[in-house]
Amino acid sequence: MRMLKAGFVLGTALGVALLFSATPSNATQKYAKETGKKCLDCHTKVPKKSDKDHLLTELGKKFAENDHKLPK
């Protein structure tokens, strides 16, 4: 019974940690709001904060090179 309770507490703590670590970054939300584009217009998949590679599409690379403004 004690191990079951400890397992439940540990599982709950891990679930909460995963929930908060999976939120998108503010910059992505900011750019999406400013440009009216979806995250996946510039990214091949939504990157995690820990990703060193931002998983950019061609549009995303041009956006980054253009001082975070949509290319003309």
Image (tube, rainbow, N blue to C red):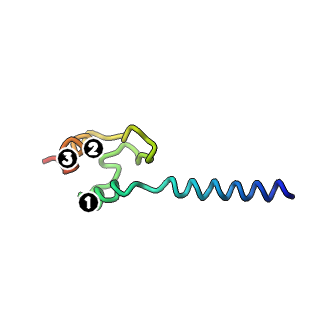
| Residue identified by numbered label 2 | 60
Helix, strand or loop at disc 3? loop
Q: Check contact, mark 3 vs mark 2: CB within 8 A.
A: no
Q: Check contact, mark 2 vs mark 1: CB within 8 A.
A: no
Q: In the figure, 5 relative to 70: above or below?
A: below
Disc marking residue 66:
none
Q: Residue furthest left?
A: 72
Q: Residue furthest right?
A: 1
Residue flagged by tag 1: what amino acid is it?
Gly
Q: CA distance from mark 2 to mark 1?
A: 14 Å
Disc marking residue 36:
1
> Who's the residue at 46% across and 56% down the image?
23
Q: CA distance from mark 3 to mark 2?
A: 11 Å
Give coordinates of residue 39: x percent, y percent. Answer: 34, 52
Disc 3 versus disc 2: nearer the observer: 3
Q: Quadrant of residue 28?
A: bottom left
> Who's the residue at 38% across and 38% down the image?
53
Give coordinates of residue 49: x percent, y percent. Answer: 43, 47
Q: Residues within 10 Å of mark 1 (few under 14, many from 20)?
A: few
> Who's the residue at 30% across and 46% down the image?
42
Q: Check contact, mark 1 vs mark 3: CB within 8 A.
A: no
Q: Residues within 10 Å of mark 2 (few under 14, many from 20)?
A: many
Residue flagged by tag 2: what amino acid is it?
Gly
Name which of mark 2 and mark 1 comes first in the sequence.
Answer: 1
Name which of mark 1 and mark 3 comes first in the sequence.
Answer: 1
Q: Quadrant of the N terminus?
A: bottom right
Disc 1 versus disc 3: nearer the observer: 3
Residue flagged by tag 3: what amino acid is it?
Asp
Q: In the figure, 9 relative to 42: above or below?
A: below
Name which of mark 3 and mark 2 comes first in the sequence.
Answer: 2
Helix, strand or loop at disc 2? helix
| Residue identified by numbered label 3 | 67
